[in-house]
Amino acid sequence: MRINWKKTFIITLDFVIGIYLVLAFTAFNKPDETAKVCTEVSINIADEATNGFINTKEIKNRLKANRLYPLEKPMRYVDARKIEETLKRSPFVKTAECFKTVDGHVNISVTQRMPTIRIKAWNGDDYYIDDKNCIMPNSHYTSDMIIATGMISRWFATQYISWLGKALMNDDLWRNQIEQINVLPDQGIELIPRVGDHIIYIGQLPETKNKNEREKSITNFINKKLERLENFYKYGLSQAGWNKYSYINLEFDNQIICKKRTLDR
């Protein structure tokens, strides 16, 4: 059987030309990805209404200051990783994610660090402690957050007061009732309530060198104190009156010592 090489060559050539024309047509009609610009920037800040440390305007300003704000920039020059790294350097940002879409949109998602207590120490220090027991700088942020005052070093704030603050904030009753923690020179703890003109003394927090045991011991300590205080509120102050006592001492487990208010004459 003889092969018609001429016919075979023509068929092969027609096939190659056909493929070439299809590819050329596709490439001609495909938009130039490198010519696309960013037409929209979406910034989502988790818990913006409740935390309020950062907002969309501050995110924009930070990116603009670093020449990274992507709007109207060619998409090929939008560096998502650099945007994330820049936002993570903010002391108020916990996580930052950035991704681009094929239609020219840039999406930025940010989560904020969660403050649990504000520290206003005797030496002028004014800062926040977050849910990871780390220090956050002071800002314009305002909230009904518990404030800790008095003889508080940064070490004592992150190792002890932070756990006390969490124990109070995790309970609906005490989160709304306790507005201030005061640390005395001997590290005794006073609690200042919103309702009732009195001071609550709970003694010194239990000390432990083991960080893993510290949270448990402080949480158990404060929960026992507050359980006794709640019962005293229900069965004592509700009968005697919220302003009868000026000082309520819960230091000892088997008794509650109260100091009556001195009436002005």
Image (cartoon, rainbow, N blue to C red):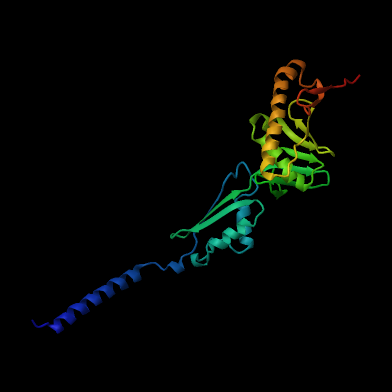
Task: Indicate the quadrant where residue 182 lies.
Answer: top right
Please name whichever residue, 26 or 187, is drawn nearer the observer in this view of the structure.
Answer: 187
Left/right of residue 196 with respect to residue 58 in the rendered view:
right
Q: Which of the 4 quarters of the picture holds residue 209?
A: top right
Q: Picture coordinates of residue 61 (x, y %)?
A: 63, 57
Callout count: 0
Q: In this view, does 148 lie above or below 194?
A: below
Residue at x-position 34% and y-position 68% = 29
Q: Please state, as top left, top right, bottom left or bottom right, where the N terminus lies in the image.
A: bottom left
| Residue 261 visible somewhere in the drawing | yes
Q: Could you say which quadrant of the image residue 89 lies in?
A: bottom right
Closest to the observer, 3 or 180: 3
* Left or right of 254, for residue 133: left
- Visible in this render: residue 145? no
Q: Residue 114, how many percent across, how many down?
A: 64, 45
Query: In the rendering, at what x and y percent does residue 205 appear?
Result: 76, 36
In the displayed structure image, the side of residue 16 where residue 239 appears, left or right: right
Q: Which residue lies furthest to the top in this view?
A: 239
Query: Compared to 241, does 158 lie above or below?
Result: below
- Pick whichever, 171 or 74, lies toward us: 171
Residue at the left extreme, as displayed = 1
Provide residue 139's location: percent of width, then percent of height: 71, 48
Q: Residue at x 73, y 41 (%)?
A: 208
Location of the C terminus by quadrant is: top right
